[in-house]
Amino acid sequence: GAVVSQHPSRVICKSGTSVKIECRSLDFQATTMFWYRQFPKQSLMLMATSNEGSKATYEQGVEKDKFLINHASLTLSTLTVTSAHPEDSSFYICSASYGSGSHRSQFFGPGTRLTVL
Amino acid sequence: GDSVTQMEGPVTLSEEAFLTINCTYTATGYPSLFWYVQYPGEGLQLLLKATKADDKGSNKGFEATYRKETTSFHLEKGSVQVSDSAVYFCALSPGGGADGLTFGKGTHLIIQP
């Protein structure tokens, strides 16, 4: 149980284009999903918290107009990187919160490798 | 703000050796603490967690105890295997798994046969 998928796993795009990444909870409903960014040999950095049916909450320094997040259902959140540039190349990982009370944990998707040429 | 500091690797051990990966944290209140593992080519997997002081999380032979007095959550295993080779991340969440996680930089563990 508690499986999270991401699509696509890899994407290469030209500078200036937009890219959409999907995050799905396959066997549970997630009212809250999270988006992280991981640079090579670095830690994961929280970008934003996505709540179903409401606007995402972005961490300081993350441009909300560049990283558009939509959480339209209890099993799907999307991250759209708009007008991508080479510096946006990174590994993007989503997670979904599952469980209740002290048993609540985050389960992570396999990540999406974005390369902007 | 919150932060997590863990020993940076790579850490190289022989099979059956004793493992300790240090992790200390800075946070307000009483965060929940986690260890995640990332095997080569795979996503992060929850290894163990602890939600309050003196709690011990354990899984697959790994253990970590939430020490509030030393703000630490060190990961230990008595006898490592080659299959334990991976990157290990210590993390905290102020509100349990309901809030975004703050991660350490990760420790690359290499176990040699």
Image (cartoon, grey):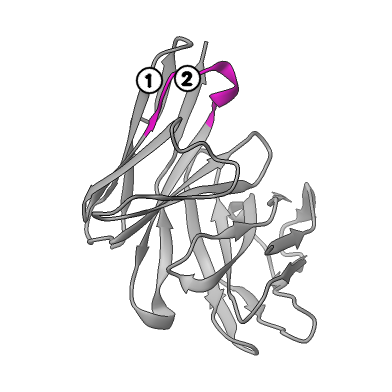
User: Which residue appears at 72% of the width and 72% of the height?
Assistant: B74
Q: Is residue B113 visible?
A: no
Query: Looking at the picture, how far across and down is residue A13, in whole percent?
Result: 43, 14
Foreground pick, B82 / B59:
B59
Question: Eyeballing the image, is A52 above or below A24?
Answer: below
Residue A68 placement, left or right of B57: left
Q: Secondary structure at mark 1?
A: loop
- Chain that bears disc 2: A
Query: Looking at the picture, how far across and down is residue B85, in whole percent?
Result: 64, 50
Q: Secondary structure at mark 2?
A: loop
Find the magenta span and give its range. Answer: A80-90
- Chain that bears disc 1: A
Spatial separation of the CA atoms under disc 1 and disc 2: 6 Å
Question: Eyeballing the image, is A33 above or below A93?
Answer: below
Q: Determine which residue is flagged by label 2.
A: A84
Residue A30 placement, left or right of A109: left
User: Which residue appears at 42% of the width and 68% of the height?
Assistant: B98
